[in-house]
Image (spheres, helix red, strand yellow):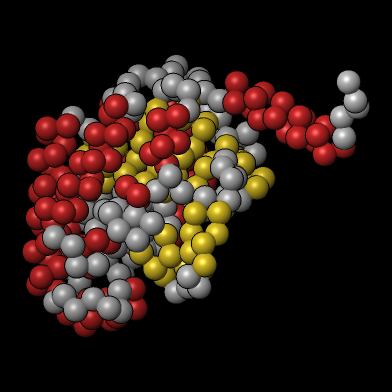
Amino acid sequence: MGHMTSVETEQEDDRSKRATRSSMLANRIVLLGASNLTLSLPLAIQQIQHCCGGPSEVLAAVGHGRSYGQSSQVLIRELPGIIESGLWSQLDSWCARPTYALLTDIGNDILYGYQPAQILQWITWCIDQLQRQSASIVVTNLPITSIESLSEWRYQFFRNVFYPFCQLSRREVIECAHAVHQGLIELAARKHYVLCEQDPAWMSPDGIHYAFGSRKRLYQHICKHFNEVHELASRAERKQTSFSSWQQRPQFAYKKMWGKERLCPQPSGLLADNTVVSLY
């Protein structure tokens, strides 16, 4: 038998490291959302781990302007809809672990022109897939009070900045937001997930993005709802840990840049506590 080449040795070492790291992972975290979650990804992971333990295997379908059901484009970058992403096939194929899922940023699709019934259908599909994995699920409802409080000029300004192709009036958006808000309440009653209402004090002047100074406090509040699903660990085991920074930032498994497809093997991200992150 011939000697292994240096490349083969590196590949074998890499497989060994991945296997060792995988055996150390305590649970799986699934994160679905758009800008708010993208801007606070390590923080959200940390706060869920504060309740559920870690290190974790994270599957995240996030991204600025992300749609739950259809492809979306921000500047030169295009991402598939969350339900069309590779996250779901990966979720089905990996070994069973205790799974905790956070769904947030649900209102984007209103500004993309989709009807409340369609949006709720996409969310229901996600919930069904997660419940097949016996996941504990927390969903944030639309920040309806903040949306209603937008003046006409503020609505027009932020709509033109974030959704330049949207032609919906403020009244139409508020009506759709109410329908989705109520629909998520009714869906929670049927599907038995935890629904978290959002405090207007968390929000920035645009009514939909979290204020920078509120992020830690609000994710503490949102993620503590996982304790309503399971008493997961002793108080000592849930002791607050220091913020876990990126050792390697994750890259999207699939995206288009200037219309050209770009692929990246997953997991592609690593936090300091050995949490591995796959980004879809």
| Residue name at image x 87 percent, y 37 percent | 6
Which quadrant holds residue 192? top left
Q: Position of residue 249 (x, y in %)?
A: 61, 51
| Identity of the residue furthest to the top in this view | 234
Residue 154 appears in the rendering: no
What number of labels is visible?
A: 0
Judge by depth and name the residue closer to the eye, 164 or 280. 280
Q: Is residue 138 above or below residue 70?
A: above
Which quarter of the figure is the N terminus placed in? top right
Residue 2 appears in the rendering: yes
| Residue name at image x 31 percent, y 70 percent | 205
Residue 270 placement, left or right of 239: right
Residue 172 placement, left or right of 207: left
Which quadrant holds residue 243? top right
| Residue name at image x 39 percent, y 68 percent | 73
Q: Position of residue 42 (x, y in %)?
A: 52, 46
Q: Position of residue 49 (x, y in %)?
A: 47, 32
Judge by depth and name the residue closer to the eye, 74 or 194. 74
Which quadrant holds residue 96? top left
Q: Is residue 135 above or below residue 67?
A: above
| Residue name at image x 56 percent, y 29 percent | 55
Residue 211 placement, left or right of 16: left
| Identity of the residue furthest to the front in this view | 1
Judge by depth and name the residue closer to the eye, 73 or 28. 73
Q: Position of residue 232 (x, y in %)?
A: 39, 20
Residue 13 placement, left or right of 166: right
